[in-house]
Image (cartoon, helix red, strand yellow):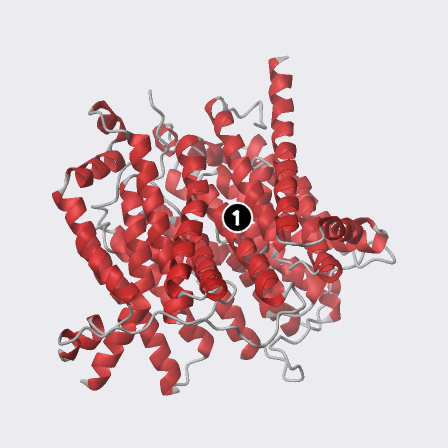
C-alpha cells in the first residue's frame, strides 16, 4: 500500500510541476500584453491539428528523446553532463561527413554507418570531460559547458569551410546522399524512423541501468562514489564509461536529426536540444522510460513554438521560460524522495 | 610600448565583467554555493540595465534596475537550494534556460513589439562615460590599463581590495570560510549557516547584475540576445583559477581579458585563421585553466554544493 502511494506521488510531481509552469507562463504572457489563449491555442493546434502535424511533433521529439536519455543516464551516475548540446552537434557533423562521403553505399549500410558515426563522435567529445573528471577531479559541469561553445564554433567553421555548399547563400553543408535519409514510416507525414529508434534506445538504456550489473555500478557510483569504491567498484572507469555512453546517445540524436529531418548541416541545427534534455530528464526523474513522455511534451512545445510565433507573435524563446520553470519546480520536488531512494539490483526502478 | 598599453587597456575592459561577477561568485562559493545560473542572471542583468537605461533615460537607473532584477533572479536560486535544498547544478541550469527565454521574450516585446518587429536597427542607449583619473591615467602602460575607464571598471578594482580586506581581516570573512569548509562546526560555534549562505548568494546577485549591466550599458550601448555568451560560466572558471581569493581572481580575470583581447587583435590584424577558431579561444582557455588548477586542489571550499541540514 505504501509502495503504491509512493508510486502515485512519483507520478503526481511532474504533473503538478507542468501545471505550475503552465500557469506561470500564462501569467507572464498576459503581463507582457500577449494574447495568451491565442498563443496556447496555436501551440495545441500545431501538434494535434492533423496527422501531418503530429508527425512533425514526433520528429521534434526524436533528438530530444536521445539527448534526454543521454542526460538521464549521466545524471544516474552522478555525472552532470551539461554538454549534450555539443555532443549532439558533433554527432550531426560526423553524420554529415559520412553521408556526403560514402554516397554510393546502399541505405542498409549507409544509415547504420551514419548513426554509428554520430555515436562515435558524441562519445569521443564526451570522453575528454569524463576523463578529466575521473582522473583529475576537474568539474565536468564547467568543461562540458565550455565544450558546447567549442562545438558550436566548430560547426560554424565546418559549414563555412570544408563542408560548405557554395551554391547556397547561408553557410550550410551539401545535403547527404538520399540513400542516407532515414525512411518515412507513415504515409502523408514526414515522420521518420528516428522516433521509433529513440523508444528502442530508451528501453535498452533502461534495461542496462536497472537489470545489469554494469547499470548497478553506474547507479552505485551515482548514489555514493565513496561507498561504491569501498564496495570494490572501479569508480573512475565507471564514470568515464557513463560519460561515453551519454555522449554516444546525444551524438546519435544529432545524427538522427541530420539524416531524418534537415539532411544537411547548418549552424542552427539544434535550437538547444541538449539543454532541453536537462528539463526532460529531470521531469522524468532521470528514468529513461519516463523520458519518452517528457521528451514528447517538449517536442510538442518545440514544434508549437514556431506556430505560436506566427499566430500570436510570441518569440519562440518563450518555450525556454517553460523549461526553466519546470526544472526549478521539479528540482525542489525531487529533494525529499532522495532520502528514501533505495538502491537495489533486483527490484529495479526507483 | 603604445601597442602594449592599448592591449592591456583592452584586456582590462574585457576583464571587468568577469572580475566583478567572479568576485561575487567567490563570496557565494566561499559560503558553499555553486551557482552555474550566474550566466542567466548576468544575461538578465544586461537586459534589465538596457531596458531601464532606455525607458527611464539614465544609465544609473539602468544599473539600479539591473541590480534589483538580478537579486530577484538569484533569490530563486537561493530559496530553492538553501531552504529547499534542491540540487544546485540543476537549479542553476534551470535558471539559465529561464533567463535566456525571459530576456528574449521581454526584449522583443518592449522594443520591437513582438517577434515580427525585430528589425536590423539597434536601439542604442547612453552609456557610462570614460572617467580618466587625473594624473594617474598619465602613467605609462599602467595608466591606460587601470586609470582610464568608466566607473564600473573602477568599482571592480575597488571591490578587489574591499573583499580582500573582508575575507582576510574581518570576522565576517572567517565566518564565511567556516561555513564553506565545515558548516556543522560553524553552526556549533553559533554561526547562522543559512543566513550567511543567503547573504553571500544575494551579494553575488548584486555583483553579477553589475557585471551584466556593464556589458549592455558601459562596454557597449545596446542589448543583444544571449550577449553574455558564456561569460557567467567563464567567471566561475576565473574563481577556480584565482583560488577563491580576490587578488587571484583579479589576475585570473586579466588573463581571460587578455585572451579575449588577443582574439580581437587576431581578427583585426587579418591573420588567416578561420574566424570560428579565433572565437573558440576564450572557451579553450577556460578548459585549460580549470585543468591546470586541478593539480593543486588547495582553496576549494569543502562543503561546496552541499545543502546544509540543521540537525
The image quadrant of residue A316 is bottom right
The image quadrant of residue A347 is top right
Q: Foreground: A151 or A53?
A: A53
- Near mark 1 (Cα within 10 A), the count class, few <14, some 14-19 or many ≥20, is many
Tell me what residue is drawn at x 21 percent, y 54 percent.
B246
Give coordinates of residue A274: x percent, y percent. Answer: 56, 53
Tell me what residue is drawn at x 63 percent, y 80 percent.
A165
Instruction: Please state if A6 lies on the left or on the right of B205 as rendered.
Output: right
Residue B28 visible (yes or no): yes
Give coordinates of residue A6: x percent, y percent. Answer: 60, 20
Dot 1: what SS? helix
In this figure, what is the number of numbered marks?
1
Q: Vertical placement of B43 versus A21: above or below? A: below
The N terminus of chain A - image quarter = top right
Instruction: Please state if B279 lies on the left or on the right of A176 as rendered.
Output: left
User: What residue does disc 1 label?
Assistant: A246
Q: Chain of mark 1?
A: A
User: In this view, which residue lies farthest toward the top?
Assistant: A1
Give coordinates of residue A7: x percent, y percent. Answer: 63, 23
Q: Vertical placement of A6 versus B301: above or below? A: above
Q: Vertical placement of A172 versus A306: above or below? A: below
Tell me what residue is drawn at x 56 percent, y 23 percent.
A346
Q: Foreground: B125 or B238?
A: B125
Instruction: Please state if A304 lies on the left or on the right of B227 as rendered.
Output: right
Give coordinates of residue A40: x percent, y percent. Answer: 73, 49
Residue A72 visible (yes or no): no
The image quadrant of residue A327 is top right
The C terminus of chain A - image quarter = top right
Amino acid at each position: 500500500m505504501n509502495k503504491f502511494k509512493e508510486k502515485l506521488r512519483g507520478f503526481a510531481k511532474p504533473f503538478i510541476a507542468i501545471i505550475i509552469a503552465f500557469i506561470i507562463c500564462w501569467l507572464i504572457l498576459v503581463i507582457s500584453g500577449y494574447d495568451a489563449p491565442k498563443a496556447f491555442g496555436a501551440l495545441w493546434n500545431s501538434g494535434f491539428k492533423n496527422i501531418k502535424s503530429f508527425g512533425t511533433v514526433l520528429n521534434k521529439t526524436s533528438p530530444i528523446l536521445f539527448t534526454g536519455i543521454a542526460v538521464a543516464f549521466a545524471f544516474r551516475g552522478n555525472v552532470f553532463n551539461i554538454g549534450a548540446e555539443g555532443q549532439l552537434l558533433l554527432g550531426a557533423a560526423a553524420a554529415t561527413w559520412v553521408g556526403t562521403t560514402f554516397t554510393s553505399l546502399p541505405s542498409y549500410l549507409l544509415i547504420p554507418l551514419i548513426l554509428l558515426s554520430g555515436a562515435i563522435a558524441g562519445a569521443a567529445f564526451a570522453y575528454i570531460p569524463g576523463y578529466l573528471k575521473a582522473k583529475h577531479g576537474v568539474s565536468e559541469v564547467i568543461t562540458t559547458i565550455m565544450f558546447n561553445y567549442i562545438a558550436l564554433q566548430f560547426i560554424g567553421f565546418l559549414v563555412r569551410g570544408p563542408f560548405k555548399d557554395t551554391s547556397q547563400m547561408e553557410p550550410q553543408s551539401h545535403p547527404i546522399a538520399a540513400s542516407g535519409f532515414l525512411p518515412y514510416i507513415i504515409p502523408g507525414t514526414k515522420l521518420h524512423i528516428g522516433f521509433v529508434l529513440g523508444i528502442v534506445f530508451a528501453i535498452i538504456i533502461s534495461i542496462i541501468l536497472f537489470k545489469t550489473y554494469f547499470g548497478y555500478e553506474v547507479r552505485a557510483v551515482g548514489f555514493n562514489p565513496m561507498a561504491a569504491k569501498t564496495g570494490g567498484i572501479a569508480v573512475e572507469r565507471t564514470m568515464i564509461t557513463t560519460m561515453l555512453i551519454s555522449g554516444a546517445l546525444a551524438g546519435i540524436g544529432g545524427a538522427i536529426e541530420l539524416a531524418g529531418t534537415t539532411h544537411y548541416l547548418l549552424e542552427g541545427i539544434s535550437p538547444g536540444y541538449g539543454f532541453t534534455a536537462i528539463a526532460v530528464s529531470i521531469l522524468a526523474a532521470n528514468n529513461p522510460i519516463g523520458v519518452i513522455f517528457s521528451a514528447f511534451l517538449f517536442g510538442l512545445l518545440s514544434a508549437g513554438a514556431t506556430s505560436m510565433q506566427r499566430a500570436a507573435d510570441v518569440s519562440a524563446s518563450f518555450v525556454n521560460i517553460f523549461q526553466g520553470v519546470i526544472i526549478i519546480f521539479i528540482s525542489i520536488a525531487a529533494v525529499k524522495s532522495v532520502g528514501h531512494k533505495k538502491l537495489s539490483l533486483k527490484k529495479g526502478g526507483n | 610600448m603604445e601597442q602594449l598599453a592599448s592591449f592591456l587597456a583592452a584586456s582590462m575592459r574585457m576583464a571587468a565583467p568577469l572580475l566583478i561577477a567572479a568576485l561575487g561568485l567567490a563570496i557565494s562559493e566561499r559560503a558553499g554555493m555553486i551557482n552555474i545560473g550566474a550566466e542567466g542572471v548576468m544575461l538578465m542583468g544586461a537586459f534589465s540595465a538596457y531596458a531601464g537605461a532606455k525607458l527611464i533615460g539614465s544609465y544609473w537607473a539602468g544599473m539600479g534596475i539591473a541590480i534589483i532584477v538580478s537579486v530577484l533572479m538569484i533569490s530563486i536560486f537561493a530559496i530553492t537550494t538553501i531552504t529547499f535544498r534542491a540540487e544546485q547544478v540543476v537549479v542553476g541550469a534551470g535558471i539559465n534556460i529561464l533567463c535566456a527565454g525571459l530576456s528574449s521574450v521581454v526584449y522583443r516585446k518592449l522594443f520591437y513589439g513582438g517577434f515580427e518587429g525585430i528589425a536590423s536597427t539597434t536601439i542604442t542607449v547612453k552609456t557610462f562615460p570614460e572617467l580618466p583619473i587625473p594624473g594617474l591615467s598619465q602613467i605609462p602602460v599602467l595608466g591606460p590599463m587601470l586609470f582610464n575607464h568608466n566607473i564600473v571598471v573602477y568599482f571592480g578594482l575597488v571591490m578587489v581590495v574591499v573583499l580582500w580586506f573582508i575575507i582576510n581581516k574581518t570576522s565576517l570573512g572567517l565566518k564565511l570560510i567556516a561555513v564553506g569548509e565545515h558548516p556543522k562546526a560553524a553552526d556549533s560555534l553559533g554561526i547562522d549557516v543559512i543566513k550567511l549562505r543567503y547573504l553571500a548568494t544575494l551579494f553575488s546577485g548584486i555583483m553579477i547584475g553589475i557585471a551584466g549591466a556593464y556589458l549592455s550599458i558601459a562596454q557597449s550601448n545596446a542589448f543583444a540576445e544571449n550577449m553574455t555568451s558564456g561569460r557567467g560560466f567563464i567567471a566561475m572558471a576565473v574563481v577556480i583559477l584565482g583560488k577563491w581569493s580576490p587578488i587571484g581572481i583579479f589576475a585570473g580575470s586579466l588573463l581571460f581579458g587578455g585572451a579575449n583581447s588577443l582574439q580581437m587583435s587576431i581578427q583585426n590584424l587579418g591573420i588567416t585563421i578561420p574566424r570560428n577558431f579565433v572565437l573558440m579561444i576564450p572557451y579553450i582557455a577556460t578548459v585549460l585553466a580549470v585543468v591546470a588548477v586541478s593539480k593543486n586542489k588547495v582553496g576549494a571550499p569543502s562543503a561546496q554544493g552541499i545543502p546544509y541540514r540543521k540537525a
